[in-house]
Amino acid sequence: MNSERLTAPLWALRAGLGTAAFLAGLDKFFNLLADWPAYLSPMAAQVLPLSPVSFMHVIGSVEMAVGALILAGYSRLGGYVAAVWLSGIAINLLTTGHYFDVAVRDVVMAIAAFTLARLAEAGVGAEARDRVGASRPLDRRNTITA
């Protein structure tokens, strides 16, 4: 596999998903992009011990943490968490009886997050770290002989 060709897609997914998650999470505190509590399923709102607004603040904190995790280079862990998280959001949206378009978008984003995690797991992007001076074990090409 020529993983060098996959480095650009990995970085695009990492930057896009990480930034989107962080900014969406941050906006849960300001509601500039959307009225986030409106996206909460009425079934979920009934069983929550918090108000929808307070729950969205918790959700926003988690989303910012996941976005920061991805942006900081923990793409495998962050990608898997984001994939599960986005799938859960899509299920919540389906139970509202509205926002089906947003649910479909979140499923696609979950697939992208899963792809990011799998690329990171396969070691894509590791070569770029090697080129910028990260430590790596010596192999035959780099063996120092006396």
Image: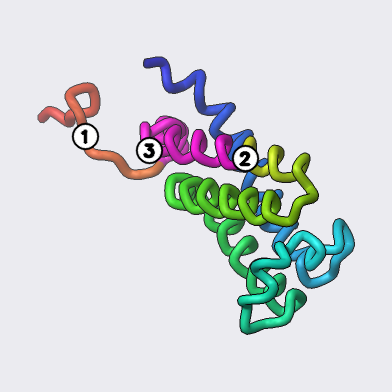
Does label 1 or label 2 sit earlier along the sequence?
A: 2
Q: Amino acid at mark 2?
A: Val
The answer to if 102 sits in the magenta stretch is: no
Looking at this view, is 109 or 124 the one in front?
A: 109
Specify how the rendered protein is coloured: rainbow
Q: Residue at x 61, y 51 (%)?
A: 91
Neighbour tally class for label 2: few under 14, some 14-19, many 20 plus, Cα within 10 Å: some
Marks 3 and 1, the one that precedes in the sequence = 3
Cα distance between the residues tagged 3 and 2: 21 Å
User: In which quadrant of the rendered image does the C terminus lie?
Assistant: top left
Residue 95 is left or right of residue 142, and the answer is: right
Q: Secondary structure at mark 3?
A: helix
Magenta range is: 109-133
Residue 42 is situated, as x and y percent measured from the top left of the image, at 73, 67
The residue carrying mark 1 is 138
Task: Report which residue position mark 3 lands on.
Answer: 121
For the residues labelled 3 and 2, say whether their Cβ atoms are less than 8 Å apart: no
Marked residue nearer the N-terminal end (3 or 2):
2
